[in-house]
Amino acid sequence: MKTPLLTHPLIASYSEMSENERKFVLDTIATHKPRKILELGIAAGANSVLILDFLREQNLLESTQLHSCDYNATYYHHNTSNGYYQVKVAHGGGANNSLSGFLVQELVPELQNKWHLHTGGLVANHLDNIGKDIDLCIIDTVHSAPGEVLDFLMVLPYLSKNAVIIMHDLVFHIFAEKNSSICALLFQALQGRKVFPPFDEPLQNIGSCVLADLTPSHIQQYFRILNFPWCYIPNDKDLQVFRNWIVKHYEPSFSVMFDRFVEIQRKWQKRENPLKRATKKLLKKIIPQRFHPFAKRIKAKLFG
Ligand SMILES: C[S@@+](CC[C@H](N)C(=O)[O-])C[C@H]1O[C@@H](n2cnc3c(N)ncnc32)[C@H](O)[C@@H]1O
């Protein structure tokens, strides 16, 4: 596979995957030859560039669609709004307020018109435009519960039979944030044939799963992951978007189950140590956002 962009300095500095992980994504596409790809959580767009370039090189641009979807229209490292998606410290160049996926315009502008970019809120807002029969979906979004589980449950009714799921940051809870283990939890729960690349043994940070034929018991299992403690409660608008989607695409029992889980999560959140809650609020208010990761570490030291 000839992919000189894989190691391009801009890709290397903006991609949140290692070179091996980026290659794993392309290899998985080469193996499964999907006709519709959905990339969920695109950040600067490093993978969007690589996938578009790969499709061009393989002469697949006419037969394969790449849809890239991000909650934030603005590149999240530059997004200074107070949304619940955390602003991280920028780790590359780029002008402030770049758009999510801005690398496509910077590195492969001639492929921009072959690219389907959808930004603004949860993927449910965009799925009717993206359409059904998604053959391969890369999920790389929040990394905190309920994040990826909501994303997966929204996408599930639009996947083709035996679609391939690629998930990244499966050991985020080891490298970054102890309580952020939702990627691992969801990936463990996926029913199907899993592939882990050999390069990151014994910790596996990326993997793919060819989903087994979907059964009612799989759907139950996927929904029940939502009864584990959440790291955040989505805002009311997103909860409503998700709920409406569930009502539309799943049995009524699942929206009942979801309501119950939200109720439990809210109770847990209320019971959370009031001192811890007050500190969280205060830190958010007084500390500039670029220092939030540092503040988080101090908070973890103080409260565990
Ligand atoms: C970890 S970064 C993605 C990194 C990118 N895949 C890469 O390898 O360079 C997470 C991205 O997900 C986006 N995001 C967060 N929550 C999301 C959601 N529920 N749906 C879609 N995108 C989301 C953020 O705005 C951010 O751009």
Image: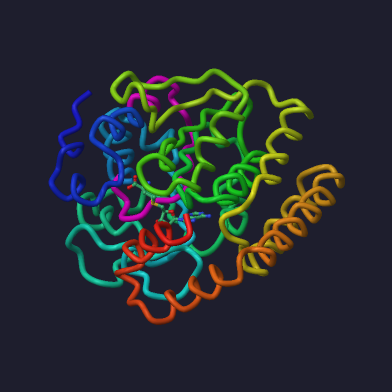
Q: Quadrant of residue 65?
A: top left
Region rendered in magenta: 27-46
Instruction: Tell whether position 261 is magenta.
Output: no
The percent coordinates of residue 101 (x first, y second) are 34, 56
Q: In the rendered image, is residue 288 in sight?
A: yes
Q: Residue at x 37, y 47 (%)?
A: 176
The percent coordinates of residue 255 (x first, y second) are 81, 51
Which image quadrant: the N terminus?
top left
User: Relative to 18, is 176 on the left or the right?
Assistant: right
Q: Compared with residue 165, is residue 236 higher up or lower down, i.e. above or below? A: below
Q: Compared with residue 216, is residue 158 higher up or lower down, i.e. above or below? A: below
Q: Compared with residue 2, is residue 105 higher up or lower down, i.e. above or below? A: below
The percent coordinates of residue 242 (x first, y second) are 68, 56
- Taking depth in this image into account, of 132 and 261 the one nearest to the observer is 261
- Taking depth in this image into account, of 46 and 106 the one nearest to the observer is 46
Q: In the rendered image, is residue 118 in sight?
A: no
Name the residue furthest front.
Answer: 302
- Taking depth in this image into account, of 131 and 207 the one nearest to the observer is 207
User: Relative to 103, is 206 on the left or the right?
Assistant: right
The percent coordinates of residue 269 (x first, y second) are 66, 63
User: Relative to 84, is 162 on the left or the right?
Assistant: right
Instruction: Tell whether position 37 is magenta.
Output: yes
- Taking depth in this image into account, of 176 and 32 the one nearest to the observer is 176
Name the residue furthest left.
Answer: 9
Q: Residue at x 44, y 75 (%)?
A: 284
Q: Quadrant of residue 251?
A: top right
Q: Residue at x 47, y 53 (%)?
A: 69
What's the colour scheme? rainbow
